[in-house]
Image (tube, helix red, strand yellow):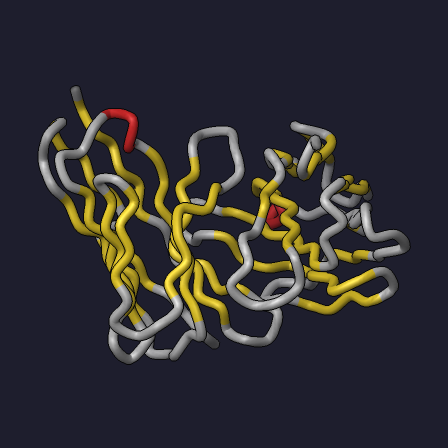
Amino acid sequence: NAGVTQTPKFQVLKTGQSMTLQCAQDMNHEYMSWYRQDPGMGLRLIHYSVGAGITDQGEVPNGYNVSRSTTEDFPLRLLSAAPSQTSVYFCASRVLGSRNEQFFGPGTRLTVL
Amino acid sequence: TQLLEQSPQFLSIQEGENLTVYCNSSSVFSSLQWYRQEPGEGPVLLVTVVTGGEVKKLKRLTFQFGDARKDSSLHITAAQPGDTGLYLCAGDSGTYKYIFGTGTRLKVLA
């Protein structure tokens, strides 16, 4: 099993550009989520999904869109990149239900100039 | 807004020393997890604590969940360079969301 995979590993964008961060998992997990990690702020939840066709907002959803057409994939779209979106982005998945371990991808380091 | 404050934010110690990291909140969590993150990688789960007052041990690491389920601590005995990393606590708010703490960056010097 590959676990949770993310692409790309690194990305540089100019202000106003759009892009999609890819996330895939092969563990048949119902729950998937996107976090951003900034220095001194831990991980903050952007969006999450509890199954195909079901998504909801986390703490910091503005400027990001998600969709969940399959159990395996959960892409994150930046509609018009801003310097404030410079961060490291992590995708995670887990079995639905409390107390279950979250499995994280290796992250995407995004810089917006 | 639920917040999890971790202290200290940074910790640099010599190999063999003991240390404690704290994770505090004004909110009650149904469970709390501790993760360790190494540079360039995603966090990896160390432990989940569920019951107020619960203590769990993982080799030289001891985790405790507060009686009121609002706080937790991680104690490392005889730290080793391999313990170096970013330690994160995460509380289950019960609404499909985990709230992560601000993180404690630990460096253990040989």
> Quick check: A99 above or below A19?
below
Front in this rendered view, residue B80 or B99: B80
Q: Residue sitting at 13 percent across and 35 percent down?
A: B78
Residue B83 locus on image (x, y percent): 28, 32
Residue A108 locus on image (x, y percent): 64, 35
Q: Is residue B60 left or right of residue A11?
A: left
Q: Quadrant of residue A33?
A: bottom right
Q: Is residue A22 left or right of residue B79?
A: right
What is the residue that sits farthest to the top in this orientation?
B110
Count up the numbered dots: 0
The C terminus of chain A sits in image quarter: top right
Front in this rendered view, residue B80 or B100: B80
Residue A86 in sight from this viewpoint:
no
Residue A24 in sight from this viewpoint:
yes
Residue B94 locus on image (x, y percent): 54, 75
Q: Quadrant of residue B73?
A: bottom left
Q: Is residue B24 left or right of residue B78?
A: right
Q: Residue sitting at 43 percent across and 68 percent down?
A: B31
What is the residue that sits farthest to the right in this orientation?
A69
Q: Is residue B46 left or right of residue A110?
A: left
Front in this rendered view, residue A99 or A63: A99
The N terminus of chain A sits in image quarter: top right
> Quick check: A18 above or below A99?
above
Residue B46 locus on image (x, y percent): 40, 46
> Quick check: B81 above or below B72?
above
Q: Residue sitting at 78 percent across and 45 percent down?
A: A16
Q: Residue sitting at 21 percent across and 40 percent down?
A: B60
